[in-house]
């Protein structure tokens, strides 16, 4: 019912300063390690779909004159299963989830002789499992301060706390389908999406095993592949789906989408708002595209737009957004991206990682 | 064909005693297990080898060096170049030579990067001797590949002005035999006095001389302790006047070259260089004296670096097509005819422009077909392969190219992670690519929905809806066996297989018949348009709607929906009993639900279905009673209205 109302986006192209290296494994997740002071130079990659998977810590050497960069691996941690998500909790600790049904909190630290290390801090084995006892992939993980939520193909939700090995809360039959995405709406509420495109919000304080509310992405069994919220207006939710569309909701009003944008060719693999430039969004796709979305500040008459978030504009959203193609389209999926100031890193199934420098806002 | 079978020992006691059997595992593995052969004459019973001890199954697979982490970089990077090349030629550009040359160079730089990576790794301290040997072997393989590709590029892909092959040939030799230049650099950068006391002084001079690096030769001679003597000055002067090929037209160059050598001959005849044996040798080489060239053999590592030097001084304007003849002569001179190694044979075949031989030989390189597939592909696109079609009847260059690409793609499909790369090669096999994908794609193993979704989308991108459908169905069956009815129905719906969806919908209904409860009520809320995929699913959806209307006390709508279900012909046989139960509830409802007309229809259906085994007679009796009472209520109500 929304397809006729969705508008299709065309992108313009501008290749920034781009560097790539091959890393011998398909990259499923890539994350900058935040630093207390200064710009991040460490980042993590997590592999998937390989005989043995790894989390690798990389450092970047930059050559200022040639504007060149060369990442080299400084530490490795063999990981059981595909790395399905990685999220930093602070500058040192990060949480990660595995297709083997477990989750970990790990730590990036320095050894006695000053060499970087990845250490396991806590492991939660068998967080996700099927009724017949088989392990179920943990498909996604969300963090909020020190709280974590994991979801899996088993339709189960686990709430964990980074400091404790106990499971704080478990909702066993949260969904009769695989849950693919989870985000925190606030400290006490999470939003999940399942294989059928059903979105459910859960009040974590309530004892019932029923969601607080539930709504659909579309009526056609389209699976959401990524959820995100606007960094300053958390009630704005955007879902990327397997058909490459972006759908946004205003959770304050009702549970019908505000608009639907047909964006990428192929499934959307990750979307992220820039933490400092809030009207800038980055997205990548299985079709090998990586895009930078920005809000036009003036309309075609040169007038300032009304003070409304472009993602909530019910009509003509296309006219309010600009899309820049950050890289020539790859012939393989781009699975992940991460942002830090004016730098974007991304990685994918062509076993390469790329750093794009000099993003302009 | 030599016998290249290999014996693999299965280290297992049970296998040794009982014997083994094997079966294929897709795509690149054989599964081996203990097995006792039984004949029909033997009594049917447990084997003597059966025990409750755990026994082992072994997976044997063909070793693919390309799966080594370093070589995987080469695999992925060359894949990008391969795809760029296919994309480029698909547009049928009018002039493709320059671009194809660029891509050939790109392949070479990928090989170079791979070699550098291998060398970096071999220098690491934390590797085992076995790993070190492995890396060494890879380096040898890829050095050969680099050398072969480079020569191929010169002879088949690049455009050589006037067919004068020597300058690029010399570049090739210089690139692959960097030792003389390196040695010269070391000598010249050091203490400049008395270089000739260094042991490798003269070998370095000759090495550079053979590679035509006259500037280096002169620089070295100038640093000789006797450089100021008359004979050295004379030699330096002579060498300085050597004509350079690429400055002047060929005809003029030939003239100058003849003059130059003739002058040297005169000086030789006058015995002007006699006082220094080495300088005399250099001059005799320039004029092409046989005995002098025979002395050069120890200075050459191979027949082809000899060939380049020899041609540089004796046939500097040699044409491409004459190269094979000189190559043979050079092999004779070096007396290596019976010691030709694999690489030698490939290079010789190139120089003879014998592409069949080349392709035959490079297939034997143990690089799992990387070189033969990529090189054949680029030769095909540059039009060089098609020339062979005139030479041999019924030969199709396209088929030849395709057979290699198909093999290479299939090999990669056998890897857990590189299957997508494999796919992209099969995509460019126009004849058998798609059928191969159809067979291989469903055999790619998956253990998560994330990977399965990837496989499905690769199938859909290629229009292989049947494959996509069958994978969705596997996911549905898997979900069923894991006790996830809801997920099973979702995958069944995604598969869009009507019968299959009905089967799963039946399970829902059946479960309701058995327990009177819905298990996956969360998903039954919202079927959306997916409900239309199967009649059984429509029935399920409508039946749930009936419950919702009843709960919402919308009795009139509820009654109408009930009637439409009753008359829909969608009701499964096993469900009639449940459907009549609902009639009972509705008929007994405080508020009148069914009109007299509707009640009569229900009674009619009941009489029609009363022989269904699930309908027990006591229930039929109750129903009749309830319906009769309802009929009475309805008639009275209707009578009041009219």
Image: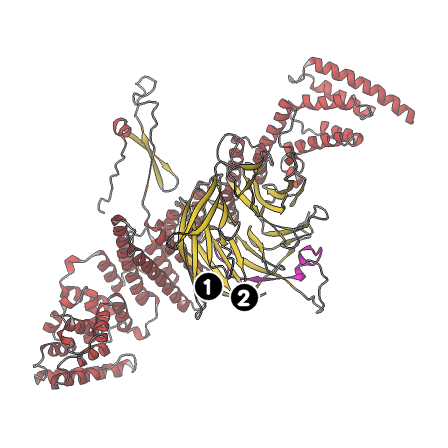
In percent of width and height, residue B249 lies at: 29, 82
Apparent side of residue B7 relative to residue A226 in the rendered image (left or right) = left
Tell me if residue B208 comes above or below residue A12 in the rendering.
below
Find numbered disc 1 in the image and state the secondary structure of the residue it sits on.
Answer: loop
> Looking at the rendering, which quadrant does residue B76 occupy?
bottom left
In percent of width and height, residue B451 lies at: 49, 44
Q: Nearer the viewer, residue A279 or A293?
A: A279
Apparent side of residue B196 relative to residue B19 in the rendered image (left or right) = left
Q: How is the image coloured?
A: secondary structure
Callout 1: few (<14), some (14-19), or many (20+) C-alpha neighbours within 10 Å? few
Q: Is residue A24 visible?
A: no
Where does the C terminus of chain B fall, quadrant-wise? Answer: top right
Q: Which mark is residue A14?
A: 2
Tell me if residue B370 comes above or below residue B439 in the rendering.
below
Confirm whether the magenta stretch covers residue A329.
Answer: yes
Find numbered disc 2 in the image and state the secondary structure of the residue it sits on.
Answer: loop
Front label number (2 vs 1): 2
> Looking at the rendering, which quadrant does residue B445 occupy?
top left
Q: Nearer the viewer, residue A10 or A26?
A: A26
Distance (Cα) linking label 2 and label 1: 27 Å
How many numbered markers are drawn?
2
Which residue: 15% across, 60% down?
A: B337
In percent of width and height, residue B301 lies at: 18, 64
Q: On the image, numbered disc 1 is attached to which residue?
A: B92
Q: Is residue B299 visible?
A: yes
Callouts 2 and 1 close, C-beta under 8 Å: no
> Looking at the rendering, which quadrant does residue B75 occupy?
bottom left
Callout 2: few (<14), some (14-19), or many (20+) C-alpha neighbours within 10 Å? few
Q: Which residues are magenta?
A: A310-335
Apparent side of residue B594 relative to residue A125 in the rendered image (left or right) = right
């Amino acid at each position: 019912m929304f397809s006729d109302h969705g508008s299709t986006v065309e992108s313009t192209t501008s290749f920034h300063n781009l560097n790539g290296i091959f890393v011998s494994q398909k990259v499923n997740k890539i994350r900058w390690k935040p630093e207390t002071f200064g710009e991040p130079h460490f980042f993590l990659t997590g592999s998937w779909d390989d005989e043995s998977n790894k989390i690798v810590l990389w450092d970047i050497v930059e050559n200022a004159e040639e504007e060149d960069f060369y990442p080299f691996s400084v530490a490795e941690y063999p990981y059981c299963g595909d790395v399905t998500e990685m999220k930093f909790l602070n500058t040192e600790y990060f949480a990660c989830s595995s297709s083997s049904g477990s989750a970990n909190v790990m730590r990036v630290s320095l050894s006695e002789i000053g060499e970087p290390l990845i250490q396991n801090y806590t492991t939660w084995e068998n967080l996700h499992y099927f009724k017949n006892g088989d392990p179920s992939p943990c498909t996604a993980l969300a963090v909020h301060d020190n709280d974590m939520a994991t979801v899996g193909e088993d339709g189960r939700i686990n709430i964990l706390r980074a400091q404790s090995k106990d499971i704080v809360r478990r909702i066993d039959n949260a969904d009769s389908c695989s849950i693919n995405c989870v985000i925190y709406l606030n400290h006490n509420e999470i939003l999940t999406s399942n294989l059928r495109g059903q979105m459910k919000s859960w009040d974590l304080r309530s004892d019932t095993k029923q969601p607080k509310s539930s709504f659909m992405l579309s009526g056609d069994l389209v699976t959401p592949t990524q959820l995100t919220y606007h960094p300053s207006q958390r009630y704005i939710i955007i879902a990327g789906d397997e058909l490459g569309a972006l759908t946004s909701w205003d959770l304050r009003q009702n549970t019908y989408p505000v608009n639907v944008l047909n964006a990428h060719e192929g499934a959307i693999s990750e979307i992220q708002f820039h933490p400092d430039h809030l009207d800038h969004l980055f997205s990548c796709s299985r079709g090998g595209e990586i895009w930078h979305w920005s809000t036009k500040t003036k309309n075609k008459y040169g007038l300032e737009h009304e003070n409304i978030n472009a993602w909530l504009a019910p009509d003509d959203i296309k006219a309010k957004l600009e899309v820049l193609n950050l890289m020539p389209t790859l012939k393989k999926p781009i699975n992940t991206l991460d942002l830090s100031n004016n730098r974007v890193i991304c990685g994918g199934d062509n076993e390469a990682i790329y750093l794009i420098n000099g993003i302009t806002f | 064909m030599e016998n290249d079978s290999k014996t693999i020992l299965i280290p297992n006691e049970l296998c040794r005693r009982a014997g083994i059997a094997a079966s294929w595992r897709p795509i690149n593995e054989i599964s081996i297990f203990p097995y006792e052969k039984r004949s029909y004459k033997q009594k049917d019973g447990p084997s003597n080898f059966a025990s409750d001890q755990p026994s082992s199954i072994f997976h044997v697979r063909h070793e693919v060096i390309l799966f080594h982490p370093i070589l995987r970089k080469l695999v992925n990077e060359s894949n990008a170049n391969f795809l760029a090349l296919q994309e480029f030629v698909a547009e049928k550009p009018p002039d493709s030579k320059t671009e194809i040359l660029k891509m050939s160079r790109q392949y070479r730089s990928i090989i170079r990067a791979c070699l550098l990576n291998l060398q970096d790794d071999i220098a690491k301290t934390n590797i085992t001797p076995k790993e070190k040997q492995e890396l060494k072997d890879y380096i040898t393989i890829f050095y050969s590949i680099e050398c072969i590709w480079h020569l191929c590029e010169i002879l088949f892909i690049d455009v050589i002005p006037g067919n004068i092959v020597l300058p690029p040939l010399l570049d090739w030799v210089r690139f692959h035999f960097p030792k003389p230049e390196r040695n010269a650099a070391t000598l010249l950068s050091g203490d400049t006095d008395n270089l000739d006391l260094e042991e490798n002084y003269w070998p370095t001079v000759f090495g550079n001389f053979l590679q035509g690096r006259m500037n280096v030769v002169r620089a070295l001679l100038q640093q000789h302790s006797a450089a100021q003597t008359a004979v050295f000055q004379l030699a330096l002067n002579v060498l300085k006047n050597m004509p350079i090929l690429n400055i002047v037209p060929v005809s003029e160059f030939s003239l100058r070259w003849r003059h130059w050598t003739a002058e040297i001959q005169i000086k030789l005849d006058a015995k002007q260089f006699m006082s220094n044996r080495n300088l005399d040798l250099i001059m005799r080489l320039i004029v092409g004296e046989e005995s002098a060239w025979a002395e050069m053999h120890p200075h050459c590592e191979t027949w082809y670096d000899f060939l380049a030097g020899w041609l540089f001084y004796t046939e500097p304007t040699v044409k491409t097509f004459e190269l094979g003849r000189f190559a043979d002569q050079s092999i004779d001179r070096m007396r290596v005819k019976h010691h030709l190694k694999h690489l030698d044979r490939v290079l010789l075949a190139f120089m003879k422009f014998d592409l069949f031989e080349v392709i035959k030989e490079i297939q034997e390189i143990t690089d799992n077909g990387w070189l033969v597939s990529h090189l054949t592909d680029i030769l095909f696109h540059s039009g060089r392969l098609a020339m062979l079609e005139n030479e041999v009847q019924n030969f199709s260059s396209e088929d030849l190219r395709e057979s290699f690409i198909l093999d290479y793609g299939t090999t990669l499909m056998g890897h857990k992670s590189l299957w997508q790369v494999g796919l992209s090669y099969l995509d460019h096999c126009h004849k058998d690519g798609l059928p191969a994908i159809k067979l291989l794609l469903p055999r790619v193993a998956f253990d998560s929905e994330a990977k399965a979704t990837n496989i499905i989308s690769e199938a859909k991108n290629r229009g292989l809806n049947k494959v996509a459908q069958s994978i969705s169905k596997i996911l549905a069956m898997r979900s069923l066996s894991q006790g996830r009815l809801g997920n099973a129905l979702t995958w069944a719906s995604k598969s869009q297989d009507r019968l299959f969806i009905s089967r799963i919908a039946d399970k829902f209904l059946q479960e309701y018949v058995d327990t009177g409860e819905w298990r996956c009520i969360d998903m039954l809320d919202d079927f959306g348009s997916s409900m239309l995929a199967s009649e059984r699913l429509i029935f399920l959806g409508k039946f749930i709607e009936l419950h919702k209307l009843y709960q919402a006390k919308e009795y009139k709508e509820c009654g109408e929906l009930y009637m439409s279900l009753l008359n829909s012909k969608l009701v499964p046989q096993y469900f009639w009993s449940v459907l009549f139960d609902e009639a009972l509830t509705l008929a007994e409802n405080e508020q009148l639900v069914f009109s007299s007309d509707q009640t009569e229809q229900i009674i009619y259906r009941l009489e029609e279905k009363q022989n269904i085994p699930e309908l027990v007679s006591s229930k039929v009796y109750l129903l009749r009673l309830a319906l009769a009472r309802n009929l009475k209520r309805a008639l009275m109500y209707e009578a009041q209205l009219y």
